[in-house]
């Protein structure tokens, strides 16, 4: 089935909850079966346990802004993920784990098939985790947190010790507070396994690892400069001079870190910003094009349609129509 023919669900989590410790989202029978459980732990850590099956291939889209930083584990199913600012989508499959940072989840889409999905995610609060690892500046995790302001994903496999901890979380025999303590211990165990895995991969495969800390800092600084003022973003030569790198090295390091060139990174941010403004419905297409740095309306319309699959005018019309229905 083509993506255009699939059912699409916009996920907008409720801000109201009956518990600060746990949220349970049951999948409606009209969509499928199963649930998504969110457990709030110490140090700002949230554990998300998803176990569900859908009645038909479906596109899930995140409808709220927010950061997503942490570890993921896929125990069953195949998911095609497309985070904002990534050039291409990627597949998450059974047996895979990953470390990721998505500074903005608005517009994050996933295509879910008919196979049962079982995933466990450990989401961490960056401020609290930064304070927690400050005592260990030589540890690899400290480097990773320092580069978390930009999008990245480091995929790997679920090791045998990880499988053991994940299985104990899914089949925890306890209830109430005892269950929370037990699960929190297993979550810390999983974080330790992933940190060890990342450090081993970094040292055993230096050509495939993340950049050196000083190079990563330069790339992160370059990314911030690119997106600080979308209307007047610097060119590559000016950008390289600002971060203290030659143009060719910056381009190489940027592509290695983000998987896309600085130009593509800027374009993606401009288009994502344009879609947010269109969804707000407060400006017309021409104003938005100029606001995000495009001087040619026709070029903006062309690249917007290539990126999102629909012209900006239609996107604005849909947003205004939705807003009018809500006011009635």
Image (cartoon, rainbow, N blue to C red):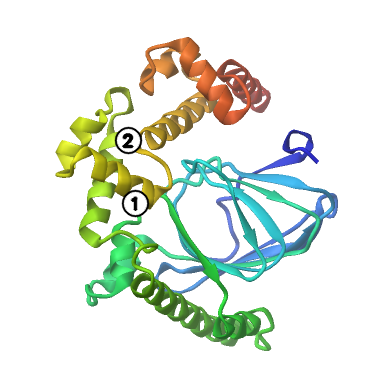
Dividing the picture into quarters, in which one does residue 177 lie? Answer: bottom right
Residue that mark 2 sits on: 227
- Compared to 50, does 254 lie above or below? above
Q: Nearer the viewer, residue 195 or 121?
A: 195
Left or right position of 326 against 304: right
Sequence order check: which comes first, mark 1 or mark 2? 1
Of residues 56 and 242, the one nearer the viewer is 242
Q: Residue at 46% of width from left, 26% of height from top?
A: 274
Task: Locate residue 182, reporting x and y percent.
Answer: 55, 86
| CA distance for labels 1 and 2 | 12 Å
- On residue 149, the disc is 1
Q: Which mark is residue 229?
A: none
Residue 168, position in %: x, y? 63, 85
Q: Residue at x 19, y 31 (%)?
A: 238
Is residue 132 at least partly visible in the picture? Answer: no
For the point 74% across and 33% down, which residue is it? 4
């Amino acid at each position: 089935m083509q993506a255009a023919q699939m059912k699409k669900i916009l996920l907008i989590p409720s801000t109201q909850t009956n518990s600060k410790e746990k949220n349970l989202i049951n999948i409606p029978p009209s969509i499928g079966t199963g649930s998504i459980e969110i457990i709030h732990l110490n140090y700002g850590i949230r554990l998300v346990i998803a176990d569900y099956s859908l009645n038909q291939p479906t596109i899930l889209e995140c409808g709220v802004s927010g950061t997503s930083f942490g570890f993921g584990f896929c125990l069953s199913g195949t998911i095609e993920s497309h985070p904002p600012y990534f050039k291409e989508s990627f597949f998450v499959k059974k047996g895979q784990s990953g470390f990721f940072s998505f500074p903005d989840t608005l517009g994050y889409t996933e295509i879910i098939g008919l196979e049962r999905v079982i995933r466990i995610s450990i989401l961490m609060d960056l401020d609290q985790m930064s304070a927690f690892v400050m005592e260990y500046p030589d540890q690899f995790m400290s480097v990773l947190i320092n580069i978390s302001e930009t999008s990245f994903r480091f995929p790997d496999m679920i090791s045998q010790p990880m499988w053991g901890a994940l299985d104990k979380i899914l089949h925890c025999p306890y209830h109430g507070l005892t269950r929370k303590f037990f699960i929190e211990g297993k979550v810390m165990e999983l974080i330790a396994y992933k940190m060890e895995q990342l450090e081993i991969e970094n040292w055993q495969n230096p050509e495939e690892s993340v950049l050196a800390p000083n190079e990563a800092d330069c790339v992160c600084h370059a990314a911030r400069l690119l997106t600080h003022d979308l209307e007047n973003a610097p060119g590559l030569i000016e950008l390289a001079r600002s971060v203290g790198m030659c143009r060719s090295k910056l381009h190489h390091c940027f592509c290695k870190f983000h998987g896309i060139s600085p130009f593509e990174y800027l374009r993606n941010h401009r288009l994502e910003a344009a879609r947010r403004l269109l969804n707000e419905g407060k400006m017309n297409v021409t104003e938005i094009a100029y606001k995000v740095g495009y001087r040619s309306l026709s070029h903006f319309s062309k690249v917007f349609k290539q990126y999102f699959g629909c012209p900006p005018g239609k996107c604005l019309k849909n947003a205004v129509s939705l807003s009018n229905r809500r006011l009635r």
